[in-house]
Amino acid sequence: MHGVRHGMGNTYPCVLDWACRARWNSRVEGLGEAVWRFTEIAEKLYFCENPNTPTLDADRLIYESADRSKRFIIRRDGSGRVRYVFDSGKEWRHGCLLNLPDENGEKPAFAGDRWNWCHFLVGQPLKDDRDWMGKVRFERYEDIRFQARIILNDIARTGPECGEWKGTRNHALFYIGFVLKREAWGGPRTFYALVNAFYSEDGETHHDVAPWLGLDPVHAAVFFSPGHPVLVQGSEVDYNVSVKSVAREAIAAFNERHETSLLLEDYTFSGILIGWEIWGGYRTDVEMSGLALNGIGKVSR
């Protein structure tokens, strides 16, 4: 990973989005061409709110919020290692409902009504140069494999109880997300097929939340796939995931729930997301290395 550029998947005002991108491009040469992008839902802890980020030294590219409560660090020593450091308890309302006024009645500057809890992800849109439209079509591949080594260095709860909101309790969730886009009408236009690496409510214990099928606030379908490795604090965990299998599980779950007949071939693999969604305050520290996404072509018989 050579760098992560400021993405548009956030609640930051558009006019400030472009100003932030221009500033980052001037601070780090070539960053505007980076394929990885941030997805941030935040209030105080946007990287763009720190005029002195990102910084580049001999062996690291560092993004920081103004108070350093959120950091993303890319090693430049050939190891391919990246690190998320985040304390969402330092966010607006301690990570609870970022769209409501604080205890002094001050209104948030950026947060929207739909996406109002902390997101801290990196991702990239995918393109297949062999396809005339640049789309990654599942039927072209025997399989598509995602690989990574991930270690959870630290996790602890730091914020107060938010209270339930639409059935949601305080939690910290780290996932690998495969974004599917439907090519025709009928069925969800966007489908997030997720591998849940870590889900905790108490900031210590992982809880299994898969399989699970539901909707996100913009009416896309979301599916948590079961049976994958779980992060354990202090231990490096290897992931070698079949994207096609996870996508099939997601679509099959939707068909069973809604009595539809969607097919894997109805969707393309449009992007990948990796990182945290947090409701409440949690101190977190995760490192990743060995990121790879490989397509295994079909053999003609």
Image (tube, grey):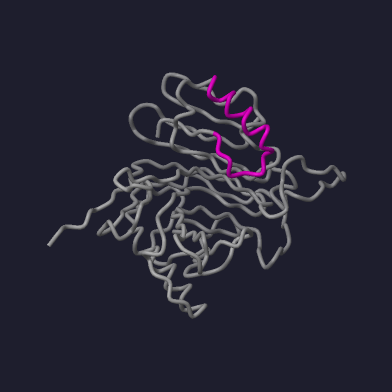
* Depth check, front residue: 106 or 69: 106
Screen quadrant of the N terminus: top left
Q: Residue at (51%, 28%) from the top-left corner? A: 62
> Magenta span has 230?
no
Q: Looking at the picture, how far across and down is residue 141, in whole percent?
A: 27, 57
Q: Is residue 97 left or right of residue 186?
A: right
Q: Is residue 33 left or right of residue 100?
A: left
> Which contiguous range is marked in magenta?
6-26
Q: State the count of labels.
A: 0
Screen quadrant of the C terminus: bottom left
Q: Residue at (36%, 58%) from the top-left corner? A: 243
Q: Looking at the picture, how far across and down is residue 219, in whole percent?
A: 60, 62
* Depth check, front residue: 274 or 81: 274
> Magenta span has 15?
yes
* Depth check, front residue: 292 or 236: 292
Q: Residue at (47%, 70%) from the top-left corner? A: 211
Q: Residue furthest left?
A: 301
Q: Residue at (42%, 19%) from the top-left corner? A: 58
Q: Is residue 129 left or right of residue 21?
A: left
Please, is residue 162 above or below residue 257 in the view? Answer: above
Q: Looking at the picture, how far across and down is residue 255, in whole percent?
A: 46, 75
Q: Main secondary structure of the magenta part?
A: helix
Q: Looking at the picture, how far across and down is residue 272, in whole percent?
A: 44, 49
